[in-house]
Image (cartoon, rainbow, N blue to C red):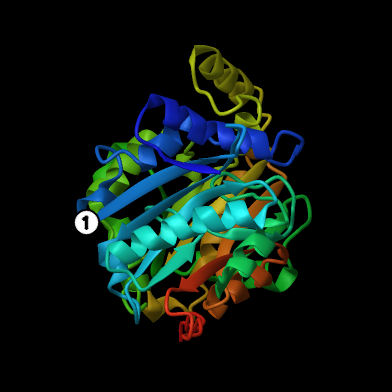
Amino acid sequence: MQLLEVVDKRTKKQFHQVPHIIYKNDSNWVAPLQGMVEGIFDPNKNKTFRNGKAIRWVLLNEKGELIGRIAAFINFNLAKTYEQPTGGCGFFECIDNQEAANLLFNAAANWNKENGMEAMDGPINFGENYVNWGLLVDGFMPQGFGMPYNPKYYEKLFREFGFDVYFEQYCYHLDYTVPFPERFWKIAGWVAKKPQYQFKHFDFKQADKFVKDFCDIYDAAWSFHEHYKPLDPDDLHDFLTESKAILDPEMIWYAYADEKPIAMFVMIPDINQLLAKLNGKLNLPGILKFLYYKKKKVINRTRIFLMGVDPKFQRSGIESGIFWHQEQIMKKKSHRHYTEVELSWAGDFNPKIIAIYEATGAKRAKTHYTMRYMFDRSKPVTKAPLIS
C-alpha cells in the first residue's frame, strides 16, 4: 500500500474521489460540495490556520487503486485546553480493511506527535464543531446538512486501532406534522408573551447588530466550558456571506431581556436534499439544478444548528418562547412544506440541552461518537465532563 500526501491537483482530485468509491452503493450518503471541503484546507478561507495547521493523505493499494484517505490537523488554541495537548483527525474514509485503516490512523497520529500533541480526537473538523464532527454509530439514514455519515464498520476500524469514546452526540428528530406536547406549548406561550422579553428574527440589513448579539450570547452561554474559545465576529460575517443562499432569516431567532441579548436559535433548511442531486459539484449545471429544486421546495426537513442561552436565563423557559415564535412563522403558507426538524447535536455532557430537546416531544434518532486516541497507551481516555 502507498500513502500519498495531498499536495497537488492530482492528489486533491483523488482525495475527493475516495468517498465516491466507498459509498457507490449507499443511497443514504450525500456528496458534500467539493468547494466547501477544499475551503476547510485553504488558509485563505479557513481562519483556523491563523494558529493551526493541517495535512492530508490518500491511500492506494498494490494495484494503484484508491482505498482510503485521512486528514490530520491541530488547532493550537484548542489543543492547549485539554489535560494533554490534543490534535485531531477527520475526513476519514476507508475500505473495510484494518491494515489500511491503521496506515491512515498512524500517519495522522505520528504527524500530531511530531507537532507536540499527546492525543488525537477523531473524526472531527478543522474548525467549528457543527459540521463534519463525529462517527455515526446509530441511525444509518440520510443525514442532515453538515452531519457526518459513514459505513457501520468504521466503528470497528476506530476501536481496533485504539480509539475510545470521548463523548457521545445525539440528534433528535421532531415530526412537525404532530403537535408539540400541550404542557410545552402552555409554557412557551406564557414565556413568549412576557413583557420583559423581546423576540426578533435575523435581518441581513442589520447583520452587524445581530452578529454582535450572537457573539454576546455565545460568550455568555459557553465561557464557563473548559474548552471554550471566543467567537470571532469576522468568522461569523464570513459564514453569513458564504451561506446566504441557504440561510432563511426567519429561522434565526434572538431573545432579549429588556433589550439585552440572552438567547439564540439557528435553524437551516436541510440542503442535503438538494445536494443529493448535484454529486458534489456546484458547476454551472449544478447551480441551475440547485436553484431549480430550491424553487420547487423539495426540502421538507430543517436542522437546528445551534442553540445558546445565557446561564442567568437557563431556567426561565426562554428557549420555549423562541420555539413559540418560530412556530408562528412555520405556520405561514411559505413554510408549510417543512415536515421534519432535526435538533442536533446534543453532547452527552450537556444534560440541559437534552432535556430541552426531549421536552418538545422529539425522539432520539442518531448517535455519533467523538473518539480519542491517547499516544501513551498506558493512559485511559477520560470522558468529557458534564456541564454543570
Q: Quadrant of the N terminus?
A: top right
Direction from residue 158 to residue 205 in the image, left or right: left
Q: Going 67% across and 52% down the picture, which residue do you hit?
A: 97
- Work out whether residue 18 or residue 218 is closer to the camera in this orientation and state it: 18
Three-letter amino acid code at the position of disc 1: Asn
- Work out whether residue 55 or residue 218 is closer to the camera in this orientation and state it: 55
* Residue sitting farthest toward the left: 50
Q: Where is residue 301 drawn, in percent x and y?
A: 66, 43
Query: Vertically, is 168 above or below 65?
Result: below
Q: Quadrant of residue 46?
A: top left
Q: Going 48% across and 31% down the picture, which residue do you hit?
A: 34
Q: Where is residue 230 drawn, in percent x and y?
A: 27, 64
The answer, for residue 245, to whether it is visible in the render is no
Q: Going 51% across and 53% down the picture, which residue do you hit?
A: 104
> Residue beneath label 1, please?
51
Q: Where is residue 292 drawn, in percent x and y?
A: 60, 18
- Work out whether residue 253 or residue 329 is closer to the camera in this orientation and state it: 253
Query: Vertically, is 275 above or below 347?
Result: above
Q: Where is residue 218 drawn, in percent x and y?
A: 34, 64
Direction from residue 75 to residue 119 in the image, left or right: right
Q: Going 35% across and 62% down the picture, which residue do you hit?
A: 112
